[in-house]
């Protein structure tokens, strides 16, 4: 069994929810069956949109330190921060790419027009990965883009109540109405507000996909999400 | 703000729940307000009851590595493993003692006869700490001691359903009937099965007490649990 290194804290609550999901997907009958996780839950990584160079430098340092502490596989439950995937890969251990794994999972649904719920930076990464795979992206437009970020920041401020939940459900429906035949939850705050049952199209949850990939990589088993 | 180092994995799910509790107790309006946590969630620490020397050695090594990674305060959300508190303290950073903090919180309720829900090893630590504080311990007896461990191992096997929940509620009531005027949840699996509202006496939850103490130590604020 391999030790999983997690670059976390973006956001903090999403990271803890991600760890719980890794544990829920691990076939375990006793403590010892679970994966060892070395976690740097760092809510003080410089802003990925406004200070990208400083963010990349810190993420690279975090990855090196996780490797030195014994991490054999690296993962980062934050889509937006995958803009700095190269800085993390430079640390050495295999890095499970959340964007790539999620796009693969979306392709497996058979859908061809993929709605994306993500930050501006995350959306750019998904647009590139979807294009490479020959899939079409469906984006939020205009005021809905701001409404999305407002709901994400509500979660970060501790509010995962009816207000932001209703907004996220509405935004997912907007993407389906705009022609999406599957929707990617491409921000780790999204699944804290939205359940797959609330959509008429398949929801491909990047946090679930990454958690399943981590279990498979570290235990050589587990569902493929 | 100080970086919190967490010696975790005993058990794994209890550690993740503990981290979520630290976050819930942190007054935060945005990511940056949260505490940085360096976590070694290690479900492979040798058995604390049957291999105490090997367990102590590994916990000491984990503490040193957390310090080297930048942890400024250490905590361990496992009562039983506090038998090895000295090995952790030897690493250097201040170690928040979960047993001592929980007994202090129990004393603050005004209760004098304190029921303890804990593993055999954890119960021994609580018996010593309560005696030092002049409080009387109320223990489970006979078959109820085994019933407690069965419920704890059910959680570790992924079952936090009605069966183990009912048992834990019954065992807490047994302690109250035996004269306890407060009950310590002295095992981090207990709060995964039992809520304070289910008891007629105050429940002093060691995980909640430790989480509040971590927030206070790292942010210089937060509730005192």
Image: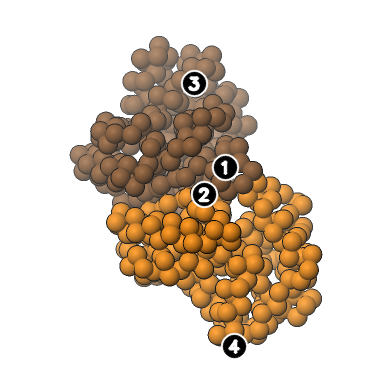
Chain colours: A brown, B orange
For the residues tagged 2 and 1, is the chain the same?
Answer: no
In the rendered image, the residue lying farthest to the left is A53
**N-terminal-most mark, 2 or 4:** 2
The chain under label 1 reads: A
Q: Gap between marks 2 and 3, in whole Å?
A: 33 Å
Labels in figure, total? 4
Q: Residues within 10 Å of mark 1 (few under 14, many from 20)?
A: some
Which residue lies under the disc numbered 2? B43
For the residues tagged 2 and 4, is the chain the same?
Answer: yes
Which residue lies under the disc numbered 3? A106
Which residue lies under the disc numbered 4? B134
Q: Is residue A203 left or right of residue B95?
A: right
Q: Gap between marks 4 and 1, in whole Å?
A: 41 Å
Q: Is residue B97 left or right of residue B114?
A: left
Q: Residue at x 47, y 34 (%)?
A: A218
Kindly report which numbered mark, 4 or 3, lies closer to the viewer in this rendering.
4
Q: Gap between marks 4 and 3, in whole Å?
A: 62 Å
For the residues tagged 4 and 3, is the chain the same?
Answer: no
Query: SS of the residue at dot 2?
Result: loop
The chain under label 4 reads: B
Q: Residue at x 52, y 39 (%)?
A: A22
Q: Residue B206: give x, y in percent of width and height.
A: 56, 67
Q: Residue A23: give x, y in percent of width and height.
A: 55, 42
- Mark 2 and 3 residues: CB-CB less than 8 Å, in contact? no
Kindly report which numbered mark, 2 or 4, lies closer to the viewer in this rendering.
2
For the residues tagged 1 and 3, is the chain the same?
Answer: yes
Is residue B218 at least partly visible in the picture? no
Q: Residue at x 52, y 21 (%)?
A: A182
Kindly report which numbered mark, 2 or 3, lies closer to the viewer in this rendering.
2
The chain under label 2 reads: B
Which residue lies under the disc numbered 1? A33
Position of residue B135 relative to residue A112, above or below, is: below
């Amino acid at each position: 069994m391999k030790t999983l290194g997690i670059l976390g804290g973006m956001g903090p609550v999403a990271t803890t929810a991600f760890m719980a999901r890794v544990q829920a997907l691990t076939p375990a009958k006793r403590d010892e069956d679970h994966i060892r996780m070395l976690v740097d839950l760092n809510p003080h990584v410089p802003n990925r949109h406004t200070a990208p160079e400083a963010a990349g430098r810190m993420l690279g340092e975090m990855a090196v330190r996780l490797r030195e502490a014994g991490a054999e596989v690296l993962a980062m439950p934050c889509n937006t921060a995958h803009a700095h995937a190269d800085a993390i890969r430079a640390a050495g251990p295999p890095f499970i790419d959340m964007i790539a794994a999620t796009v693969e999972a979306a392709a497996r649904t058979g859908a061809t027009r993929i709605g994306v719920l993500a930050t501006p930076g995350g959306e750019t990464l998904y647009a590139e990965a979807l294009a490479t795979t020959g899939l079409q992206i469906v984006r939020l437009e205009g005021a809905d883009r701001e409404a999305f970020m407002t709901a994400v920041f509500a979660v970060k401020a501790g509010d995962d109540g009816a207000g932001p939940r209703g907004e996220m459900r509405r935004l997912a429906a907007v993407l389906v109405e705009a022609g999406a035949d599957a929707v990617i939850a491409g921000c780790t705050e999204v699944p804290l507000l939205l359940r797959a049952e609330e959509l008429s199209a398949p929801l491909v949850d990047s946090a679930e996909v990454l958690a399943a990939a981590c279990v498979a990589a570290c235990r050589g088993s587990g569902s493929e999400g």
